[in-house]
Amino acid sequence: MARSPARAVLAAMNGPGHRRLLNVFMAIVLAHWVEHLAQAYQIWVLNWPRPRARGALGAVFPWLVSSEWLHYGYALVMLVALVMLRPGFVGRARTWWTVALVIQFWHHIEHLLLLIQAQTGHAYFGRAVPTSILQLAFPRVELHLFYNSVVFLPMVLAVYLHLRPSAAESTAMRCTCAQPAERLRVAAPSAT
Ligand SMILES: [Zn+2]
């Protein structure tokens, strides 16, 4: 039966393309961490006032942070990648990837609220600056270090398990993520 083009693309993303896309995605995740770690450094090592501590790209292009587009963009890209690359995960790896996806869904909602407030120029909850729901209970910088950690840890665990599947998980996988030795043998057959 013929598959729709969208299904074919998704199958390729979770089959032959899974390994490369996961690498690209992890690079994006690390670039996002650089922003938050740079911000932590600016606040706790350089003692910059918090409104000035905008992270790495934010230090060069302040509007990227003040408009909320930079962190909304990262949150959206991560959410979409967590959804689109999920079918390639099986077994225990799928479980932990889903945990990361659920937490990132909420994290993305928080950033959407911040983006809407920054774009409309109207802060919610009677605050002077854009404020998300859990920011009513926790300071923003610490809250987002927490958010990024609780998305990152299950994601890394999922990738670790994905690269080291059990025999049962291995037979269900459609990608090449767990078979570097296999591919090397195919690419370079022994001379004997
Ligand atoms: Zn894979």
Image (cartoon, rainbow, N blue to C red):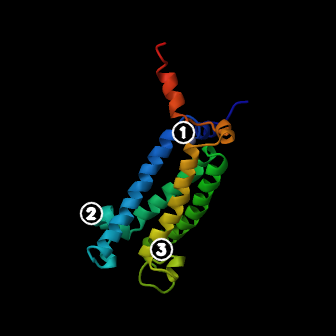
Read off the residue under disc 3. 143
- Label 3 neighbourhood size at 10 Å, few (<14), some (14-19), many (20+)? some
Decide if residue 80 is in sight here. Answer: no
The residue at the point 26 percent across, 74 percent down is 46
The residue at the point 40 percent across, 60 percent down is 33
Q: Residue 112, relative to residue 47: is it above or below?
A: above
The residue at the point 51 percent across, 84 percent down is 125
Mark 1 CB in 8 Å range of ligand 1? yes
Label 1 close to label 3 by CB (< 8 Å) = no
Horizontal arrangement in the rendering, residue 32 relative to residue 151 (left or right): left
Q: Amino acid at mark 1?
A: Cys
Residue 97: where, in percent of width, then height?
59, 54
Q: Residue 98, relative to residue 173: is it above or below?
A: below
Single out the residue that lies furthest toward the right. Answer: 1
Please tell me which residue lies in front, 105 or 163.
163
Q: Amino acid at mark 3?
A: Leu
Residue 161: where, in percent of width, then height?
58, 48
Of the numbered discs 3 and 2, the one sitting upstream in the chain is 2
Instruction: Tell me which image quadrant ligand 1 sits in.
Output: top right
Of the numbered discs 1 and 3, the one sitting upstream in the chain is 3
Single out the residue that lies furthest toward the front. Answer: 192
Please tell me which residue lies in front, 104 or 191.
191
Read off the residue under disc 2. 60
Q: Amino acid at mark 2?
A: Val
Q: If the image is split into quadrants, where does the N terminus sit?
A: top right
In the rendered image, which quarter is residue 129 located in?
Answer: bottom left
In the rendered image, which quarter is residue 179 located in?
Answer: top right
Mark in front: 1 vs 3: 1
In the rendered image, which quarter is residue 40 located in?
Answer: bottom left
Label 1 and label 3: CA atoms lie apart by 33 Å
Label 3 and label 2: CA atoms lie apart by 23 Å
